[in-house]
Amino acid sequence: LAIPPQMHLSVVLTFRLDNYGDNLVDRATRCLEVLHRQLVRHVSPSRPVEIIIVEWGWADPYDSVADFLETLDLQKTKKPITFRVFRVPKELTMRASINPRKQKYLEFNAKNVGIRRA
């Protein structure tokens, strides 16, 4: 089965930098560095890849994921690997009536935001 050349891969991740889930900065760093390294190794230069990160429930004073990405030691590459960050402010996530248990983080809703923009 041949894949048309315009097809590409979208990887959707979700997190925010308020240390929700403990040790998040270290875990996110390892995740993104390993993912990027594997994509550099295995992606064809003719197949664009995007890594979409959804900041679900972002609020000040926490750093943005976009700023966080700038601090990572990602290998420079000519391969078509791009990052896109979407912020969903805390005010919007709290207004959603789909959270009857008042959970702090609705991971699947956040992933849906990214999938719809992939």
Image: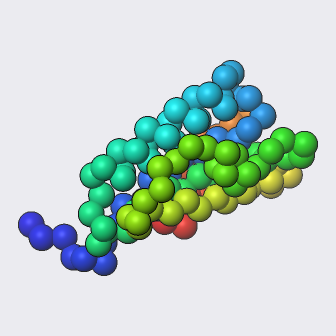
Nearest the eye: 13 or 106: 13
* Position in image of residue 39 (x %, y %): 36, 51
- Locate residue 9: give its quadrant: bottom left
The answer to whether residue 103 shows anywhere in this view is no
Nearest the eye: 37 or 89: 37
Nearest the eye: 92 or 86: 86
Identity of the residue furthest to the right in this view: 61
Residue depicted at x 30% and y 78% = 6
Residue depicted at x 56% and y 43% = 73
Vertical position of residue 11 compared to residue 16: above or below = below
Residue depicted at x 47% and y 50% = 75
Q: Report whether 60 appears left or right of 67.
A: right
How is the rendered protein coloured?
rainbow
Residue depicted at x 67% and y 51% = 70
* Position in image of residue 14 (x %, y %): 59, 45
* Position in image of residue 56 (x %, y %): 70, 47
* Position in image of residue 96 (x %, y %): 76, 51
Identity of the residue furthest to the top in this view: 22
- Numbered marks: total: 0
Q: Report whether 30 appears left or right of 69.
A: left
